[in-house]
Amino acid sequence: MSNIPYKIYLEENELPKDWYNVRADMKKKPAPILNPATLKPVTVDELSHIFCHELALQELNDTDAYIPIPDEIREFYKMYRPSPLVRAYFLEKKLGTPAHIYYKFEGNNTSGSHKLNSAIAQAYYAKKQGLKGVTTETGAGQWGTALSMACAYFDLACHVYMVKVSYEQKPFRREVMRTFGASVTPSPSMDTEIGRKINAEFPGTNGSLGCAISEAVEAATSKEGYRYVLGSVLSQVLLHQSVIGLETKAALDKYGIKADTIIGCAGGGSNLGGLISPFVGEMLRGEADYDIIAVEPASCPSLTRGKYAYDFCDTGKVCPLAKMYTLGSGFMPSANHAGGLRYHGMSSVVSELYDQGLLSARAVEQTSVFEAAEMFSRVEGILPAPESSHAIRVAIDEALKCKETGEEKNIVFGLTGTGYFDMVAYQKFNDGDMSDYIPSDAELEKSLSQLPQV
Ligand SMILES: *Cc1c(COP(=O)(O)O)cnc(C)c1O
């Protein structure tokens, strides 16, 4: 082993004091989000009906590069941060690669993923504004869990609309949220107008993320003292997640390591955006160059096969419109897709960076993702989330390329969470029941034909 430790830890006092807002360094900014009624850029006032005021300001702030992390949030971060940057010595050995592989592990907290980094920030601003509580949606359950932890910490009510199929298939996720004090409702429910409408139109539906978002927004905007919060896609979430990239960069700098390749999985784009932000900032300022790869599922390929256009963020079309790489808000990944990352669109910041050629994208099939997860778990001792395993897949592929060329590249990837609540997916894989589904061009054309005319 070299002089680089297995785990590079930062000290508590090295925890970042500011979040980094990559939009400030972008010459061409992401397109503004639009009011769905007027199709004009939304104002802070309009956004403040949906989001906490401070978060509305952050959402529209594309000029301040550094935004101080309030002390109360840093105190909470200290419970589980700085998170380790791990040198994957055992994986390197297994692959027989000359590449050096590092991963930033965000699964070291009870919620099990990076989502807590933004959940605690959003709960803090809600509390500071004197709100009673927040509403949100959750698909697989990671975001709902993170938010319920954050709300428990600040003594806020937390109402989670959980996609019905997950609510039924993941009862233990639901119980974790309830233990932290959240109320959890299967979506579509009969509590909201949009839920009743969807139930009437599609009796027995399993629900979808887009529908749960609409329900949560309706619940927040129709109740006094509540706001809606979202765990991915938004620019404010990428901002909070920049803590991942800032720590990663600080840890690499400590040992004089220059990353060559940086890899992250991409669902709505928040962990990827957070991980790459400081590095992309250097690229934008002409200080350094990196090979950045976003990895998405072949069954929900928004960057590699989507269109860069304005689209709805939710099924009910109540949220602002965002310009993003999208498959169309009506797109539903195939039922056999078990690997997470199933949102139809991509963060407008990540979309714009991709459009400018600052990162590339790769789509991978889920059986190959679980093969990578299995290999990783056996040598590195961490059971990864299926979402995170998309990044593992491409990190392994890149390391194997180095084996052929003999290059000693430094490969860094984001390991966003643990897979303990995804055992049904692992069971499918272990039983040989997992298959791959790639949507046809005709299928994608169908949902893309529904894009709004903006
Ligand atoms: C939610 C989630 C993701 C995907 O969300 P992004 O916003 O794309 O980061 C990835 N990994 C884990 C473990 C998650 O919970």
Image (tube, rainbow, N blue to C red):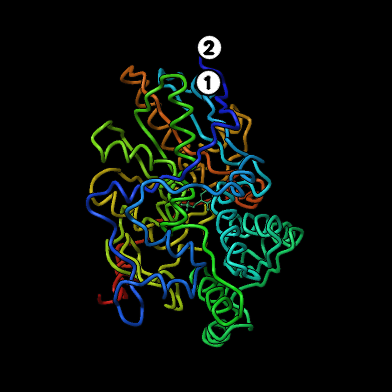
* 3D distance between C-alphas at marks 2 and 1: 8 Å
- Residue drawn at x 39%, y 26% as measured from the top left: 400
Classify residue 233 as left or right of residue 123: left
On residue 274, the disc is: none
Residue 276 visible (yes or no): yes
Q: 351 or 250, which lies in front?
A: 250
Where 123 sits versus 219, above or below? above
Image coords of residue 250 (percent x, y): 46, 29
> For the image shown, how many numbered marks are present on the structure?
2
Image coords of residue 257 (percent x, y): 41, 21
Q: Helix, strand, or loop for circle 1? A: helix
On residue 1, the disc is: 2
Residue 330 visible (yes or no): no
Please tell me in which quadrant of the rendered image residue 301 appears.
bottom left
Please tell me in which quadrant of the rendered image residue 357 appears.
top left
Task: Identify the amino acid type marked 2.
Answer: Met
Marks 2/1 in contact by CB < 8 Å: the verdict is: yes
Residue positioned most to the right: 179
Task: Identify the amino acid type marked 1.
Answer: Tyr
Where 321 sits versus 411, above or below? below
Classify residue 376 as left or right of residue 438: right
Q: Helix, strand, or loop for circle 2? A: loop
Image coords of residue 40 (percent x, y): 29, 76
Classify residue 161 as left or right of residue 296: right
Image coords of residue 294 (percent x, y): 37, 45
- Residue drawn at x 48%, y 62% as measured from the top left: 55
Where 88 sits versus 366, above or below? above
Graded by Cα atoms within 10 Å as few (under 14), some (14 to 19) or many (20 or more), the crowding at tag 1 reads many
Looking at the rendered image, the quarter that the C terminus falls into is: bottom left
On residue 89, the disc is: 1
Confirm or reject: label 1 Cβ below 8 Å from ligand 1. no
